[in-house]
Image (cartoon, rainbow, N blue to C red):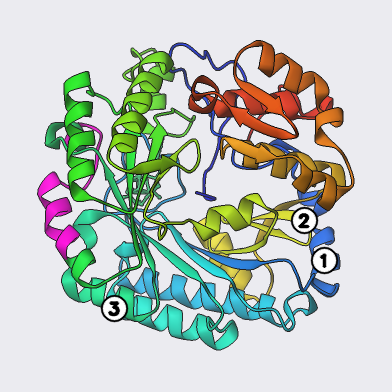
Amino acid sequence: MSERDPATSVGVDHEKTGVGSVFVSNYPPYSFWGEDQRPRIEEVLDAPGAQDARLGLYIHIPFCRRRCKFCYFKVYTDKNARDVSAYVDAVVREVELYAARRVFAGRKLSFVYFGGGTPSFLSAKHLSDLVARVKQVFPWDAVEEVTFECEPGTLTRPKLETIRDVGVTRISLGVENFNDKILEDNGRAHVSREIYRVAPWIQELNFDQLNIDLISGMVGETWDTWKDSIRKTVEMDPDSVTIYQMELPFNTVYSRGVLDGGAVPVADWATKREWHAYAIEQLESAGYGVSSAYTMLKQDGRARFAYRDALWHGADLLGLGVSSFSHVGGVHFQNLSRWESYLETVGAGQFPVSRAYATSARERLTRELILQLKLGRVDLSYFSKKFGIDPQEEFADAFRRLTERGMLQVDRGVVTLSRTGLLQVDLLLPEFYAPEHQNARYT
Ligand SMILES: C[S@@+](CC[C@H](N)C(=O)[O-])C[C@H]1O[C@@H](n2cnc3c(N)ncnc32)[C@H](O)[C@@H]1O
Ligand code: SF4
Protein backbone atom coordinates (compact mmCIF):
# COMPACT_ATOMS: atom_id res chain seq x y z
CA MET A 1 0.00 0.00 0.00
CA SER A 2 2.88 2.36 -0.13
CA GLU A 3 2.04 3.39 -3.65
CA ARG A 4 -0.90 5.50 -2.73
CA ASP A 5 -0.97 8.75 -4.59
CA PRO A 6 -2.99 10.56 -1.98
CA ALA A 7 -4.87 13.71 -2.63
CA THR A 8 -5.88 16.16 0.00
CA SER A 9 -7.72 15.57 3.25
CA VAL A 10 -8.82 19.18 3.44
CA GLY A 11 -12.55 19.71 3.27
CA VAL A 12 -13.44 16.01 3.43
CA ASP A 13 -16.99 15.63 4.67
CA HIS A 14 -16.75 12.73 7.09
CA GLU A 15 -20.37 11.75 6.70
CA LYS A 16 -20.88 11.79 2.93
CA THR A 17 -18.07 10.22 0.93
CA GLY A 18 -16.57 13.37 -0.53
CA VAL A 19 -13.62 13.72 -2.83
CA GLY A 20 -10.35 13.57 -0.90
CA SER A 21 -8.06 11.11 0.89
CA VAL A 22 -8.73 9.82 4.36
CA PHE A 23 -6.24 6.94 4.58
CA VAL A 24 -3.05 7.90 6.45
CA SER A 25 -0.04 5.99 5.17
CA ASN A 26 2.85 8.12 6.37
CA TYR A 27 3.97 11.10 8.44
CA PRO A 28 4.71 14.00 8.06
CA PRO A 29 2.16 14.51 5.25
CA TYR A 30 3.51 14.30 1.72
CA SER A 31 2.92 18.00 1.05
CA PHE A 32 5.91 18.74 3.31
CA TRP A 33 8.31 16.64 1.27
CA GLY A 34 10.28 18.64 -1.26
CA GLU A 35 12.86 18.69 -3.98
CA ASP A 36 15.05 20.91 -1.78
CA GLN A 37 15.58 18.00 0.64
CA ARG A 38 16.94 15.60 -1.96
CA PRO A 39 20.58 16.20 -0.87
CA ARG A 40 19.66 14.60 2.47
CA ILE A 41 19.37 11.28 0.64
CA GLU A 42 23.01 11.41 -0.41
CA GLU A 43 23.98 11.99 3.22
CA VAL A 44 22.03 9.01 4.47
CA LEU A 45 23.25 6.73 1.67
CA ASP A 46 26.86 7.49 2.58
CA ALA A 47 26.39 6.87 6.30
CA PRO A 48 26.75 3.41 7.83
CA GLY A 49 23.34 1.69 8.05
CA ALA A 50 21.87 0.79 11.42
CA GLN A 51 22.70 -2.91 11.52
CA ASP A 52 19.80 -3.61 13.87
CA ALA A 53 17.16 -1.87 11.68
CA ARG A 54 15.20 -4.25 9.51
CA LEU A 55 15.49 -3.69 5.78
CA GLY A 56 12.85 -4.41 3.16
CA LEU A 57 12.40 -3.97 -0.56
CA TYR A 58 9.24 -2.66 -2.20
CA ILE A 59 8.99 -3.20 -5.95
CA HIS A 60 6.29 -1.24 -7.74
CA ILE A 61 4.76 -2.89 -10.80
CA PRO A 62 2.63 -0.15 -12.35
CA PHE A 63 0.69 -2.16 -14.94
CA CYS A 64 -3.00 -3.15 -14.95
CA ARG A 65 -5.34 -4.66 -17.50
CA ARG A 66 -7.92 -1.94 -16.85
CA ARG A 67 -8.07 1.07 -14.60
CA CYS A 68 -10.68 0.54 -11.85
CA LYS A 69 -12.94 3.58 -11.52
CA PHE A 70 -12.08 3.99 -7.83
CA CYS A 71 -8.33 3.51 -8.10
CA TYR A 72 -5.79 6.22 -7.36
CA PHE A 73 -2.56 4.25 -7.71
CA LYS A 74 0.12 5.01 -10.27
CA VAL A 75 -0.85 2.56 -13.03
CA TYR A 76 -0.59 2.21 -16.81
CA THR A 77 -2.99 0.20 -18.96
CA ASP A 78 -1.27 0.84 -22.30
CA LYS A 79 2.13 -0.81 -21.93
CA ASN A 80 3.31 -3.69 -24.13
CA ALA A 81 5.89 -6.43 -23.54
CA ARG A 82 8.73 -4.19 -24.76
CA ASP A 83 7.74 -1.47 -22.29
CA VAL A 84 7.61 -4.02 -19.49
CA SER A 85 11.11 -5.26 -20.40
CA ALA A 86 12.41 -1.70 -20.34
CA TYR A 87 10.80 -1.20 -16.94
CA VAL A 88 12.32 -4.41 -15.53
CA ASP A 89 15.73 -3.25 -16.75
CA ALA A 90 15.24 0.12 -15.07
CA VAL A 91 14.21 -1.40 -11.74
CA VAL A 92 17.28 -3.65 -11.82
CA ARG A 93 19.52 -0.69 -12.66
CA GLU A 94 17.93 1.27 -9.81
CA VAL A 95 18.55 -1.46 -7.23
CA GLU A 96 22.16 -1.75 -8.44
CA LEU A 97 22.67 1.98 -7.89
CA TYR A 98 21.44 1.71 -4.30
CA ALA A 99 23.20 -1.54 -3.40
CA ALA A 100 26.57 0.08 -4.06
CA ARG A 101 26.01 2.62 -1.26
CA ARG A 102 27.40 2.34 2.23
CA VAL A 103 24.07 2.43 4.09
CA PHE A 104 23.23 -1.04 2.72
CA ALA A 105 26.67 -2.64 3.18
CA GLY A 106 26.49 -5.94 5.04
CA ARG A 107 22.73 -5.74 5.57
CA LYS A 108 20.30 -8.49 4.67
CA LEU A 109 16.76 -8.10 3.41
CA SER A 110 14.07 -9.23 5.86
CA PHE A 111 11.08 -8.80 3.56
CA VAL A 112 10.09 -8.04 -0.01
CA TYR A 113 6.79 -6.63 -1.26
CA PHE A 114 5.64 -6.56 -4.88
CA GLY A 115 2.89 -3.96 -5.06
CA GLY A 116 1.04 -2.17 -7.75
CA GLY A 117 -0.59 -1.72 -9.99
CA THR A 118 -0.67 -5.40 -10.60
CA PRO A 119 2.51 -7.46 -10.08
CA SER A 120 0.69 -10.49 -11.51
CA PHE A 121 0.40 -8.58 -14.81
CA LEU A 122 4.08 -9.54 -15.35
CA SER A 123 4.68 -12.58 -17.52
CA ALA A 124 6.43 -15.53 -15.89
CA LYS A 125 9.50 -14.69 -17.98
CA HIS A 126 9.65 -11.07 -16.89
CA LEU A 127 9.13 -12.04 -13.27
CA SER A 128 11.88 -14.71 -13.21
CA ASP A 129 14.26 -12.32 -14.94
CA LEU A 130 13.49 -9.48 -12.52
CA VAL A 131 13.82 -11.61 -9.39
CA ALA A 132 17.01 -13.37 -10.51
CA ARG A 133 18.69 -10.03 -11.21
CA VAL A 134 17.48 -8.38 -7.99
CA LYS A 135 18.71 -11.38 -5.98
CA GLN A 136 22.19 -11.00 -7.48
CA VAL A 137 22.35 -7.58 -5.91
CA PHE A 138 20.35 -8.17 -2.72
CA PRO A 139 20.23 -11.89 -1.83
CA TRP A 140 17.01 -13.17 -0.30
CA ASP A 141 18.51 -15.83 1.98
CA ALA A 142 17.35 -14.05 5.15
CA VAL A 143 13.98 -12.96 3.79
CA GLU A 144 11.05 -14.09 5.92
CA GLU A 145 8.14 -12.90 3.79
CA VAL A 146 7.66 -12.07 0.12
CA THR A 147 4.25 -10.64 -0.73
CA PHE A 148 2.92 -10.50 -4.28
CA GLU A 149 -0.27 -8.60 -5.15
CA CYS A 150 -2.42 -10.35 -7.74
CA GLU A 151 -5.50 -9.51 -9.76
CA PRO A 152 -7.42 -12.80 -10.20
CA GLY A 153 -7.87 -12.58 -13.98
CA THR A 154 -4.13 -12.29 -14.64
CA LEU A 155 -3.21 -15.62 -13.04
CA THR A 156 -2.65 -18.94 -14.77
CA ARG A 157 -1.42 -22.06 -13.08
CA PRO A 158 2.05 -21.94 -14.74
CA LYS A 159 2.38 -18.27 -13.77
CA LEU A 160 1.50 -19.10 -10.16
CA GLU A 161 4.13 -21.86 -10.21
CA THR A 162 6.72 -19.29 -11.27
CA ILE A 163 5.51 -16.89 -8.59
CA ARG A 164 6.03 -19.63 -6.01
CA ASP A 165 9.37 -20.76 -7.47
CA VAL A 166 10.91 -17.29 -7.32
CA GLY A 167 10.21 -17.29 -3.57
CA VAL A 168 6.86 -15.61 -2.99
CA THR A 169 5.36 -16.69 0.35
CA ARG A 170 2.28 -14.50 0.60
CA ILE A 171 -0.28 -14.01 -2.15
CA SER A 172 -2.54 -11.00 -1.81
CA LEU A 173 -5.54 -11.38 -4.09
CA GLY A 174 -7.58 -8.34 -5.15
CA VAL A 175 -11.04 -9.88 -4.89
CA GLU A 176 -12.79 -6.65 -3.79
CA ASN A 177 -16.30 -8.13 -4.17
CA PHE A 178 -17.94 -11.34 -5.40
CA ASN A 179 -20.79 -9.72 -7.32
CA ASP A 180 -20.17 -9.62 -11.07
CA LYS A 181 -22.35 -6.59 -11.72
CA ILE A 182 -20.54 -4.61 -9.01
CA LEU A 183 -17.16 -5.73 -10.31
CA GLU A 184 -18.07 -4.72 -13.86
CA ASP A 185 -19.70 -1.40 -12.91
CA ASN A 186 -16.62 -0.39 -10.88
CA GLY A 187 -14.36 -1.11 -13.81
CA ARG A 188 -12.68 -4.22 -12.43
CA ALA A 189 -11.04 -6.41 -15.05
CA HIS A 190 -11.89 -9.70 -13.32
CA VAL A 191 -15.12 -11.65 -12.82
CA SER A 192 -16.03 -13.82 -9.83
CA ARG A 193 -15.49 -17.08 -11.76
CA GLU A 194 -11.79 -16.20 -11.98
CA ILE A 195 -11.52 -15.95 -8.19
CA TYR A 196 -12.78 -19.52 -7.90
CA ARG A 197 -10.53 -20.70 -10.72
CA VAL A 198 -7.32 -19.47 -9.04
CA ALA A 199 -8.11 -20.27 -5.39
CA PRO A 200 -7.47 -24.05 -5.66
CA TRP A 201 -4.18 -23.45 -7.50
CA ILE A 202 -3.01 -21.14 -4.74
CA GLN A 203 -3.86 -23.83 -2.21
CA GLU A 204 -2.24 -26.68 -4.16
CA LEU A 205 0.96 -24.71 -4.62
CA ASN A 206 1.31 -24.34 -0.85
CA PHE A 207 1.97 -20.64 -0.49
CA ASP A 208 2.48 -19.83 3.19
CA GLN A 209 -0.38 -17.35 3.14
CA LEU A 210 -3.31 -16.12 1.10
CA ASN A 211 -4.72 -12.67 1.79
CA ILE A 212 -7.92 -11.39 0.21
CA ASP A 213 -8.57 -7.67 -0.32
CA LEU A 214 -12.15 -6.44 -0.11
CA ILE A 215 -13.59 -2.94 -0.36
CA SER A 216 -16.51 -1.87 1.78
CA GLY A 217 -18.63 0.50 -0.28
CA MET A 218 -18.04 -0.25 -3.95
CA VAL A 219 -20.52 1.52 -6.17
CA GLY A 220 -23.73 -0.51 -6.24
CA GLU A 221 -23.08 -2.25 -2.90
CA THR A 222 -26.12 -3.12 -0.77
CA TRP A 223 -26.44 -5.00 2.52
CA ASP A 224 -27.39 -8.12 0.57
CA THR A 225 -24.43 -8.03 -1.82
CA TRP A 226 -22.02 -7.25 1.04
CA LYS A 227 -23.32 -10.08 3.23
CA ASP A 228 -22.99 -12.43 0.29
CA SER A 229 -19.40 -11.30 -0.35
CA ILE A 230 -18.48 -11.85 3.30
CA ARG A 231 -20.09 -15.31 3.32
CA LYS A 232 -18.10 -16.26 0.21
CA THR A 233 -14.91 -14.83 1.72
CA VAL A 234 -15.33 -17.01 4.82
CA GLU A 235 -16.00 -20.04 2.60
CA MET A 236 -12.73 -19.42 0.76
CA ASP A 237 -10.92 -19.77 4.09
CA PRO A 238 -7.98 -17.38 3.41
CA ASP A 239 -5.27 -16.78 6.03
CA SER A 240 -6.14 -13.10 6.18
CA VAL A 241 -8.73 -10.67 4.92
CA THR A 242 -7.99 -6.99 4.36
CA ILE A 243 -10.94 -4.61 4.18
CA TYR A 244 -10.61 -1.02 2.95
CA GLN A 245 -13.42 1.49 3.18
CA MET A 246 -13.90 3.02 -0.25
CA GLU A 247 -12.48 6.51 -0.52
CA LEU A 248 -12.42 8.89 -3.46
CA PRO A 249 -9.05 10.59 -3.80
CA PHE A 250 -8.85 13.29 -6.44
CA ASN A 251 -7.42 11.33 -9.31
CA THR A 252 -10.04 8.58 -9.70
CA VAL A 253 -12.66 8.27 -12.45
CA TYR A 254 -15.44 8.51 -9.86
CA SER A 255 -13.93 11.64 -8.26
CA ARG A 256 -13.77 13.39 -11.60
CA GLY A 257 -17.49 12.72 -12.05
CA VAL A 258 -18.26 14.19 -8.63
CA LEU A 259 -16.06 17.23 -9.24
CA ASP A 260 -17.90 17.76 -12.53
CA GLY A 261 -21.13 18.08 -10.57
CA GLY A 262 -22.31 14.45 -10.61
CA ALA A 263 -23.90 12.71 -7.62
CA VAL A 264 -21.62 10.91 -5.14
CA PRO A 265 -21.87 7.28 -6.20
CA VAL A 266 -20.50 5.78 -2.97
CA ALA A 267 -22.32 4.98 0.31
CA ASP A 268 -21.72 7.38 3.21
CA TRP A 269 -19.03 6.73 5.81
CA ALA A 270 -21.44 5.54 8.49
CA THR A 271 -22.79 2.84 6.15
CA LYS A 272 -19.32 1.76 5.05
CA ARG A 273 -18.31 1.48 8.70
CA GLU A 274 -21.40 -0.63 9.44
CA TRP A 275 -20.52 -2.96 6.59
CA HIS A 276 -16.94 -3.12 7.80
CA ALA A 277 -18.10 -3.85 11.38
CA TYR A 278 -20.37 -6.63 10.10
CA ALA A 279 -17.44 -8.20 8.23
CA ILE A 280 -15.25 -8.08 11.33
CA GLU A 281 -17.96 -9.77 13.40
CA GLN A 282 -18.54 -12.51 10.83
CA LEU A 283 -14.83 -13.15 10.48
CA GLU A 284 -14.43 -13.24 14.26
CA SER A 285 -17.11 -15.94 14.45
CA ALA A 286 -15.24 -17.84 11.74
CA GLY A 287 -11.98 -17.90 13.75
CA TYR A 288 -10.24 -14.71 12.66
CA GLY A 289 -8.92 -11.98 14.95
CA VAL A 290 -8.45 -8.25 14.48
CA SER A 291 -4.84 -7.68 13.52
CA SER A 292 -5.29 -4.05 12.48
CA ALA A 293 -8.03 -1.64 11.47
CA TYR A 294 -7.96 -3.24 8.03
CA THR A 295 -6.70 -6.79 8.43
CA MET A 296 -8.23 -9.87 10.04
CA LEU A 297 -5.86 -12.80 10.60
CA LYS A 298 -6.88 -16.41 11.00
CA GLN A 299 -6.13 -17.38 14.58
CA ASP A 300 -4.26 -20.56 13.76
CA GLY A 301 -0.91 -19.21 14.88
CA ARG A 302 0.47 -19.23 11.34
CA ALA A 303 -0.91 -16.09 9.80
CA ARG A 304 1.10 -12.90 10.09
CA PHE A 305 2.05 -9.80 8.10
CA ALA A 306 5.78 -9.09 8.48
CA TYR A 307 5.88 -6.24 5.95
CA ARG A 308 3.27 -4.18 7.76
CA ASP A 309 4.71 -4.86 11.21
CA ALA A 310 8.25 -3.95 10.14
CA LEU A 311 7.10 -0.77 8.42
CA TRP A 312 4.99 0.38 11.33
CA HIS A 313 7.97 -0.18 13.66
CA GLY A 314 10.28 2.08 11.68
CA ALA A 315 12.07 -0.42 9.41
CA ASP A 316 14.07 0.82 6.45
CA LEU A 317 12.25 0.32 3.18
CA LEU A 318 13.82 0.78 -0.22
CA GLY A 319 11.09 1.42 -2.79
CA LEU A 320 11.91 0.70 -6.44
CA GLY A 321 10.02 1.75 -9.53
CA VAL A 322 8.05 4.70 -10.76
CA SER A 323 6.51 6.82 -8.00
CA SER A 324 7.46 4.43 -5.18
CA PHE A 325 8.15 5.53 -1.60
CA SER A 326 11.24 4.82 0.52
CA HIS A 327 12.22 5.36 4.12
CA VAL A 328 15.93 4.90 4.83
CA GLY A 329 17.83 6.03 7.92
CA GLY A 330 15.03 8.42 8.88
CA VAL A 331 14.80 10.06 5.45
CA HIS A 332 11.60 9.69 3.41
CA PHE A 333 11.82 9.90 -0.36
CA GLN A 334 9.59 9.35 -3.35
CA ASN A 335 10.50 8.45 -6.92
CA LEU A 336 9.60 10.41 -10.02
CA SER A 337 6.05 9.66 -11.03
CA ARG A 338 6.32 10.10 -14.82
CA TRP A 339 7.24 7.02 -16.85
CA GLU A 340 9.66 8.82 -19.18
CA SER A 341 11.51 10.74 -16.50
CA TYR A 342 11.81 7.65 -14.29
CA LEU A 343 13.30 5.55 -17.12
CA GLU A 344 15.57 8.31 -18.39
CA THR A 345 16.94 9.24 -14.97
CA VAL A 346 17.73 5.66 -14.01
CA GLY A 347 19.16 5.09 -17.49
CA ALA A 348 21.55 7.99 -16.87
CA GLY A 349 22.74 6.28 -13.68
CA GLN A 350 21.03 8.72 -11.31
CA PHE A 351 18.62 8.15 -8.45
CA PRO A 352 15.12 8.79 -9.82
CA VAL A 353 13.94 10.72 -6.77
CA SER A 354 11.50 13.60 -6.96
CA ARG A 355 11.15 14.70 -3.35
CA ALA A 356 12.42 13.91 0.12
CA TYR A 357 11.96 14.71 3.79
CA ALA A 358 14.50 14.20 6.57
CA THR A 359 12.51 13.41 9.71
CA SER A 360 13.36 14.54 13.23
CA ALA A 361 13.36 12.00 16.08
CA ARG A 362 10.11 13.52 17.28
CA GLU A 363 8.50 13.05 13.84
CA ARG A 364 9.67 9.43 13.75
CA LEU A 365 8.04 8.90 17.12
CA THR A 366 4.77 10.42 15.89
CA ARG A 367 4.93 8.40 12.68
CA GLU A 368 5.37 5.09 14.46
CA LEU A 369 2.74 5.97 17.05
CA ILE A 370 0.05 6.82 14.51
CA LEU A 371 0.85 3.81 12.33
CA GLN A 372 0.81 1.47 15.33
CA LEU A 373 -2.48 2.92 16.57
CA LYS A 374 -3.95 1.30 13.45
CA LEU A 375 -3.18 -2.03 15.18
CA GLY A 376 -5.88 -1.22 17.72
CA ARG A 377 -3.59 -1.84 20.68
CA VAL A 378 -0.30 -0.14 21.47
CA ASP A 379 2.05 -0.62 24.41
CA LEU A 380 3.51 2.84 25.02
CA SER A 381 6.59 1.51 26.84
CA TYR A 382 7.97 0.59 23.39
CA PHE A 383 8.18 4.32 22.57
CA SER A 384 9.72 5.34 25.89
CA LYS A 385 12.45 2.76 25.33
CA LYS A 386 13.07 3.59 21.69
CA PHE A 387 12.74 7.38 21.73
CA GLY A 388 13.29 8.29 25.41
CA ILE A 389 9.98 10.15 25.41
CA ASP A 390 6.82 9.16 27.26
CA PRO A 391 4.03 9.42 24.66
CA GLN A 392 1.35 9.43 27.34
CA GLU A 393 2.72 12.74 28.61
CA GLU A 394 3.76 14.08 25.25
CA PHE A 395 0.38 13.45 23.62
CA ALA A 396 -1.73 13.85 26.78
CA ASP A 397 -4.21 16.23 25.11
CA ALA A 398 -4.82 14.00 22.09
CA PHE A 399 -5.31 10.93 24.27
CA ARG A 400 -7.69 12.87 26.54
CA ARG A 401 -9.80 14.16 23.65
CA LEU A 402 -10.06 10.75 22.02
CA THR A 403 -10.86 9.08 25.35
CA GLU A 404 -13.67 11.60 25.93
CA ARG A 405 -15.07 10.76 22.49
CA GLY A 406 -15.05 7.03 23.31
CA MET A 407 -12.48 6.25 20.61
CA LEU A 408 -9.84 4.72 22.87
CA GLN A 409 -8.69 4.17 26.42
CA VAL A 410 -5.27 4.24 28.02
CA ASP A 411 -4.71 1.88 30.88
CA ARG A 412 -1.32 1.24 32.54
CA GLY A 413 0.54 2.47 29.51
CA VAL A 414 -1.45 0.44 26.98
CA VAL A 415 -3.72 2.18 24.45
CA THR A 416 -6.73 0.21 23.26
CA LEU A 417 -9.01 1.55 20.55
CA SER A 418 -12.73 0.92 20.87
CA ARG A 419 -14.39 -0.75 17.87
CA THR A 420 -15.87 2.65 16.97
CA GLY A 421 -12.39 4.15 17.09
CA LEU A 422 -10.82 1.36 15.08
CA LEU A 423 -13.39 1.68 12.30
CA GLN A 424 -12.44 5.32 11.75
CA VAL A 425 -8.85 5.30 12.94
CA ASP A 426 -7.55 7.33 9.98
CA LEU A 427 -9.76 10.25 10.99
CA LEU A 428 -8.34 10.22 14.52
CA LEU A 429 -4.63 10.20 13.70
CA PRO A 430 -4.24 13.90 12.81
CA GLU A 431 -4.89 14.57 16.53
CA PHE A 432 -1.27 13.49 17.06
CA TYR A 433 0.22 15.68 14.33
CA ALA A 434 2.47 18.62 15.21
CA PRO A 435 0.63 21.97 14.88
CA GLU A 436 2.46 22.81 11.65
CA HIS A 437 1.17 19.59 10.06
CA GLN A 438 -2.46 20.00 11.11
CA ASN A 439 -4.94 20.64 8.28
CA ALA A 440 -2.18 20.14 5.75
CA ARG A 441 -2.67 18.91 2.24
CA TYR A 442 -1.87 15.21 2.17
CA THR A 443 -0.30 15.02 -1.31
C1 LIG B 1 -2.69 -2.39 -5.80
S1 LIG B 1 -4.29 -2.95 -5.49
C2 LIG B 1 -4.18 -4.74 -5.36
C3 LIG B 1 -3.68 -5.57 -6.53
C4 LIG B 1 -4.41 -5.47 -7.85
N1 LIG B 1 -4.03 -4.24 -8.50
C5 LIG B 1 -5.89 -5.56 -7.74
O1 LIG B 1 -6.53 -4.52 -7.65
O2 LIG B 1 -6.41 -6.69 -7.78
C6 LIG B 1 -4.43 -2.56 -3.78
C7 LIG B 1 -5.77 -2.49 -3.15
O3 LIG B 1 -6.13 -1.13 -2.88
C8 LIG B 1 -7.51 -1.08 -2.65
N2 LIG B 1 -8.04 0.18 -3.21
C9 LIG B 1 -7.77 0.70 -4.41
N3 LIG B 1 -8.45 1.87 -4.56
C10 LIG B 1 -9.17 2.07 -3.43
C11 LIG B 1 -10.06 3.10 -2.98
N4 LIG B 1 -10.37 4.14 -3.73
N5 LIG B 1 -10.59 2.99 -1.74
C12 LIG B 1 -10.28 1.93 -0.96
N6 LIG B 1 -9.44 0.94 -1.34
C13 LIG B 1 -8.90 1.00 -2.56
C14 LIG B 1 -8.12 -2.32 -3.28
O4 LIG B 1 -8.67 -3.13 -2.27
C15 LIG B 1 -6.94 -3.01 -3.93
O5 LIG B 1 -7.00 -4.39 -3.81
S1 SF4 C 1 -6.30 -3.47 -10.70
FE1 SF4 C 1 -5.63 -2.73 -8.67
S2 SF4 C 1 -4.01 -1.22 -9.04
FE2 SF4 C 1 -5.03 -1.66 -11.01
S3 SF4 C 1 -6.50 -0.04 -11.25
FE3 SF4 C 1 -7.57 -1.73 -10.22
S4 SF4 C 1 -7.30 -1.43 -7.96
FE4 SF4 C 1 -5.88 -0.09 -9.07
Horizontal and vertical percent for residue 370? 67, 37
Q: Which residue is mark 1?
A: 44
Picture quarter with the C terminus: top right
User: In the current view of this chain or complex, which residue is farthest to the right?
Assistant: 388
Horizontal and vertical percent for residue 101? 75, 79
SS under mark 1: helix
Distance from the alpha carbon under mark 1 to that under mark 2: 7 Å
The answer to whether marks 1 and 3 mark residues whose Cβ atoms lie closer than 8 Å is no
> Residue, x 46% and y 34% (percent of image)?
251
> Residue, x 19% and y 76% (percent of image)?
158
Range covered by the magenta-colored residues: 184-200
Residue 162, which numbered label?
3
Q: Earlier in the sequence, mark 1 or mark 3?
A: 1
Residue 331, which numbered label?
2
> Residue, x 53% and y 84% (percent of image)?
141
Q: Amino acid at mark 1?
A: Val
Horizontal and vertical percent for residue 178? 18, 39
SS under mark 3: helix
The crowd level at tag 3 (other Cα within 10 Å; few <14, some 14-19, many 20+) is: some
Does 251 sit left or right of 53 as displayed? left
Distance from the alpha carbon under mark 1 to that under mark 3: 36 Å
- Quarter of the rendering containing residue 87: bottom left
Task: Let me know if residue 323 appears in the view.
Answer: no
